Amino acid sequence: SRLNASRALESRLLQLLNRAATVDDVLKIEEQLARVRADIERMDAQLKGLMGRVEYASITIELSVRYRVYRIDLSCETPNVQEEFNKLIVKAGAIGRVVESWSGGSNAYLVVEVKTEDVQEIEGEIEAKISDRKTTIVESSVDKSMITIRIAKPKTIEVGIDFISTVQSGINAMIIVISLIVSGALAIIPILLVGGVGYLGYRRWRGKLQKYKAAK
């Protein structure tokens, strides 16, 4: 700014010099003009020195929108794994994009990419069958969420079948034991009856024998 002001002053002094009427005015204006020009040369040299030492660097600023999206892992249980899997493939494909899928009879899974606003719609299709849910929130430049759905048969059904089989085996064993006990008891009853009658007959014979000896 000082350099610009000095150059403006130089321009005014030159105009005054052109309009000077006397020699004395010309001398005074030239003297002042010389000082101004010396200041201009000095400041101009300083400016060039500073410009030579400045290093220029380019800075690139990139502005982008960041979205908070979900990474969801759902575990579902259903007796009809394949049927549920086929339904989900169709429904998920209509709402978003099925990235990956696999079915193995008793187990299946699929990975679905959907708009974050459509996450609840996907979950609503299987809400009653969800047994476990894990959610992670991450930042992304794309407003898309990923949902992994794992489908399996309920473990409770398998445990129930095993339990029923165990109970049935136990009941059968108890029936066999009771049958053996009952059969054994029935076989012993005639023996006890015969033995009891024999014992009573022996006591009666012995009593008569003692009376006979006493009479002699």
Image (cartoon, helix red, strand yellow):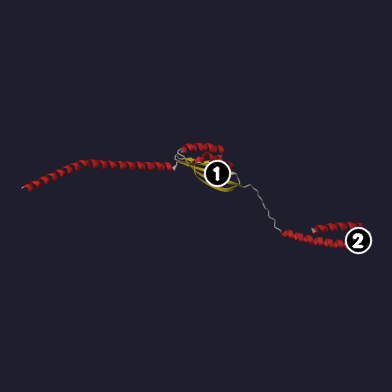
Report crowding for label 1: few under 14, some 14 to 19, many 20 or more residues within 10 A (C-alpha). Answer: many
Label drawn at residue 26: 2
Dividing the picture into quadrants, the one containing residue 205 is top left
Whole-percent x, y for residue 118 in the image: 57, 41
x 50%, y 36%: residue: 87
Label drawn at residue 211: none
* Dot 1 or dot 2, earlier in sequence: 2
Determine whether, in the image, residue 32 is placed left or right of residue 77: right
x 52%, y 38%: residue: 89
Report crowding for label 2: few under 14, some 14 to 19, many 20 or more residues within 10 A (C-alpha). Answer: some
Q: Which residue is mark 1?
A: 146
Whole-percent x, y for residue 68 in the image: 59, 47
For label 1, the SS is strand
As shown in the figure, which amino acid type bears the numbered disc 1? Met
x 84%, y 61%: residue: 36
As shown in the figure, which amino acid type bears the numbered disc 2? Val
